[in-house]
Image (cartoon, helix red, strand yellow):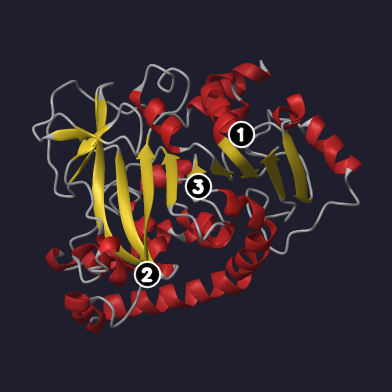
Amino acid sequence: MKNFIFLSLCLGFLFGCDSKSSESNKEQTPVKTDSANVLVQKDTVTELASTNSFNTNNQFNNITSVLAGHKGKANNLNYLFDTLIWDGHSKFIDSSWTRLEKKRLQAMKDWGRKEFETASAKTKIVFYPFSGPDYLTANAFFPNADKYIMLGLEPVGKLPDLEKFKKGEPSEYSNDFKKSLGDIFDKSYFITRKMQSDFQAQKVNGLLPILTFFIKRTGNEILDIKYLVRYNQDSISEVAYDFKSDDHKPFGVRVDFLQEGKQKSVYYFKYDVSNKLFNDTTVFNKYINANTTNCITYIKSASYLLHAGFMSNMRDLILKNSSSIIQDDTGIPFKYFEEGKKFDVKLYGEYTRPVEDFPYLNLQKPLQEAFHRDSLKVKKMPFHLGYHWGSKKDVIIFAQKK
C-alpha cells in the first residue's frame, strides 16, 4: 500500500513534453562538440568571447534589469523606474535580496565554495535535475562553472514586453513576480505545484523571467537567449527567441551570460525524466548523457523522486556520469553510494525523517547509520537549505567518485 501511495504522489510531479513529427524549416548541421546525435541551428550562438565584443545593451538584459530592480542599468528602459510601480518594485527587490544575503546566501557562498573546492576543480559542468528556476543556489556553490544544465516540469515561457503593458498591468505583473519569489526567499526552494500555478501566461509567463532574474541579481549580464526544440526522436535544435511554430513548442531554453568577462551558459529543459520518456531510445536521454560527462550533479528539494523505480534511468545516469554528487536526502538513496564503494562520502548537518509532506517515507537506515558512525566527523552547516526550514535539521551528502 505504501508503495502504491508513493508511486501515485510522485506521478503527480510528472508530465510529458509533447512534440509532433515534422522537419525543421531551417538549415541544420551536426555539432559534435555539444552532443552525440543532436542537431542545432548553424547560427546558434555567436562566439563573442573571441572578439571581446560583448553586447550587454540588448532587450534581454534590459528587461531583466528592470525585473531585478537595477536602477540606471536598463538602458532604454530606465525611464520605467520613474513610475511608482517599478520604483517600488526596485525597493522591494533590493531589501529582499539584502535579507537573503544576510540570512543564507553569503554563508552558502563562503562555506560551499570552500567545502566543494575539489569538486569544482575537476569540472566546469553542473547538472541540476528537478531544479525549477533555481540557478541561485547552484551558482552560490559552484560559481566557476561554465555550463549549468537544469531540468524541471515548469514551462519555459517568455520575458515580459514591459513597454507594451497596458494600464494596471505593471502593478499586476510586479505583484505576481514578487509572489513567485516568496518560497525561494523564505524557504530556499520552489514548490512545484505552486510554480505550475504561478508561471502561467496571464501572470509570470513561465520560469524564464525568474531564471534570468537570478542570473542578473548574482552579478551577471544577459547576452542572448535561444530556445530549444525537439523534433520527435530525431534531433534537438537551438532556435531564435522569436521562433514560432504551430507544430513545435520550445521545451528548453539557453541563456548566455557574461560573468567577470567570460561567457557562460544556463540550459533549462521542461521534460519528464521518468523511465518511459527518458531511456536510451530517446534523443533527450542521449543529449543529457553526452553533455553531463564528468559533471557535478547537484540535487536539492527533489521530492524523493530518485527513490522511485520509475526514475532508475536518471538515477543510473547520474551515478555513471558524475565526478561528484552534492545533494540533500531527497536525492539518490544513500545506499547507492555505498554499493561497490565507488564514492568517498562526507556528511554535513543533522539527519531526520522526511517532512510531513512525505508521510509514506521512513528514515534511510544506511544514511542514519552513516551519521551515527561518522558523528565525530560530521560538520555543521552555517545556513539552512531544503525542506526542513522549520526544524533547521538539514543534510548535505558530498559524494566524490574515487
Q: Residue at x 78, y 45 (%)?
A: 351
Foreground residue among 173 and 72: 72
Give the CA separation, mark 1 to mark 3.
Answer: 20 Å
Which is more foreground, mark 1 or mark 3?
Answer: 3
Q: Residue 99: percent from the left, percent from the top?
A: 55, 74
Q: Position of residue 166 (x, y in %)?
A: 13, 65
Question: What residue is shown with label 2?
Answer: 261
Neighbor class of circle 3 (other Cα within 10 Å; few <14, some 14-19, many 20+) is: many
Q: Is residue 263 above or below residue 270?
A: below
Sequence-earlier tag: 1 or 3:
3
Label ID, residue 304: 1
Amino acid type assigned to the residue bearing label 3 in the image:
Val
178 or 261: nearer the viewer: 261
Q: Which residue is mark 3?
A: 126
Q: Does residue 365 appear left or right of residue 299 in this picture?
A: right
Identified at 72% across, 31% down, the residue is 342
Q: Residue at x 34, y 39 (%)?
A: 33
Q: Quadrant of the C terminus?
A: top right
Residue for point 58% across, 57% down: 187
Lower sequence index among marks 2 and 1: 2
Residue located farthest toward the front when viewing the structure as drawn:
50
- Dot 2 or dot 3: first in sequence order is 3
Q: Amino acid at mark 2?
A: Gly
Front tag of 2 and 3: 2
- Position of 245 with respect to 294 (left or right) is left
Quarter of image, res 81: bottom left
Would you place residue 281 above or below residue 254 in this image?
Answer: above
Asked whether 360 or 318 is in front, the reply is: 318
Q: Quadrant of residue 110?
A: bottom right
